[in-house]
Image (spheres, helix red, strand yellow):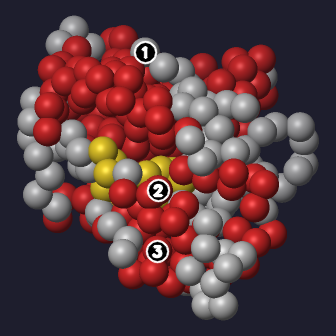
Amino acid sequence: MKLNLIVTGLFVIFSNCLFGQNNFSSNPLDAIFETRDSKNFWEAFDKMDQSKQNPFVEYMQKGSPGVKGFTENRILNADSLFSAVKKRKADYELSRNVLEGLPSKEKRVRAIYSALKYWYPNAKFPPIYFVYGRFNSGGTSSPEGIIIGTEKLTNLDGISGLIAHELVHYQQKIEGKDMLLKWCLLEGGADFIGELISGDAINQQYYQYGEQNKDKLAQEFVTRLKNADYQDWLYGTSKKDDRPNDLGYWMGYKITEAYFNKQKDKQKAIEEILNIKDPMLFLKQSGFLDVYIEKYQKSKKESFDDFFK
C-alpha cells in the first residue's frame, strides 16, 4: 500500500503566517529526524492488555513537540487515542517496523533539502517528527516542524515526496486577498517545487484527472477563482461529478509551471513563486488560463484586463 499522501490542508493554509516565527536551521545537512515517539507508542501499545490504566497517557506526556503539534484536531487526547487503537489494533500493527528503513530515506531527504538550498538560498529546514495519531492525517506542517502520521505507513514509498511538499510550505509567503486562486497557488506551488527538488510527483490521481478534463475544469475555475469558497477544488467535493478531491493542487501546479517556464532566471522564478504578492497578477503573468479568461470575458462583454482588476 502506498503512503497516504492526503495532507490536512486547512492548517497548512496559514503556514506563511506561522512558520516564519521559528528559528529552524539554514543548513540542509542539519535535518533532524525524530523517531522517539514511535518507540514510546509501541511501549504503550504493548501494555494495553495488561494495564488497568490508559497507557497512552504516558505516550502523550513523553511526547516530542511533534506529538504536541499533532494533538489538536488529530490525536485530541490520550483517551481518544486509546479508543482508536483498541478499534484498529491490526491496522496499527502494520506499521510496527516501518521506520526500520528510515536511514536510507534520510540520505534522500538530505539531498532534497540541499536541492532546495540551491534553488532558494534563504530556505529554512524544520525537523521531521514521526508520530502516531488516530488515522486521520498522513502528514502536516506545523510550527513545530513536519509531522508524519506514522500509523498510516505500511512502507516508506512516497515519503520523500511528501516531506518535500511540506518543506516548501515552510518557505512560502503568499499575500493577497483570500480566494480560491491563492489557496491553489499555495498547494500547487508546493507540489511543483517539491517535485523539482525531489523528482517525486505526488498526488497523481488529481493530475491524471486534471489533464484528461482540462478544458471543462479550466472553464469552471475561471468562474470560481476569485471566490473564497474552495468546495470541489480543495479538501473535499460536493460529489456533483466524478472528480477526485483536491484538483486545486493540479490547477495551482499548472499555473506555477507555466509561470516558471516563461522566466529566464529560474532561481529568481522560484523566489517569486514562494513569495507571491498578488495572485491575480501572477496568474496573468503565467498566461496559463488566458484562452479561457478571454472567452469568459467575451461572454460578459468585458475586456481581458478587466478580469484581473
- The answer to the question of whether label 2 and label 3 lie on touching residues, with beta carbons closer than 8 A, is no
Q: CA distance from mark 3 to mark 1?
A: 36 Å
Q: Nearer the viewer, mark 3 or mark 1?
A: 3
| Res 282 quadrant in image | top left
**Considering only order in the chain, which callout, 2 or 1, is on the residue closer to the N terminus?**
2
Quadrant in which the N terminus is drawn: top right
The residue lying toward the viewer, choosing from 230 and 117, is 117
Which residue is tagged 3? 59
Which residue is tagged 2? 38
Badge 1: how crowded within 10 Å, few (<14), some, or many (20+)? few
Q: CA distance from mark 1 to mark 2?
A: 28 Å
Which residue is tagged 1? 199
Taking the spot 37% from the left edge, 63% from the top edge, the residue there is 66
Where does residue 113 sit, x and y in percent of width and height? Answer: 24, 29
**Helix, strand or loop under label 3:** helix
Q: Left of 217 or right of it: where is 200?
A: left
The residue lying toward the viewer, choosing from 157 and 289, is 157
**Helix, strand or loop under label 1:** loop
**Considering only order in the chain, which callout, 3 or 2, is on the residue closer to the N terminus?**
2
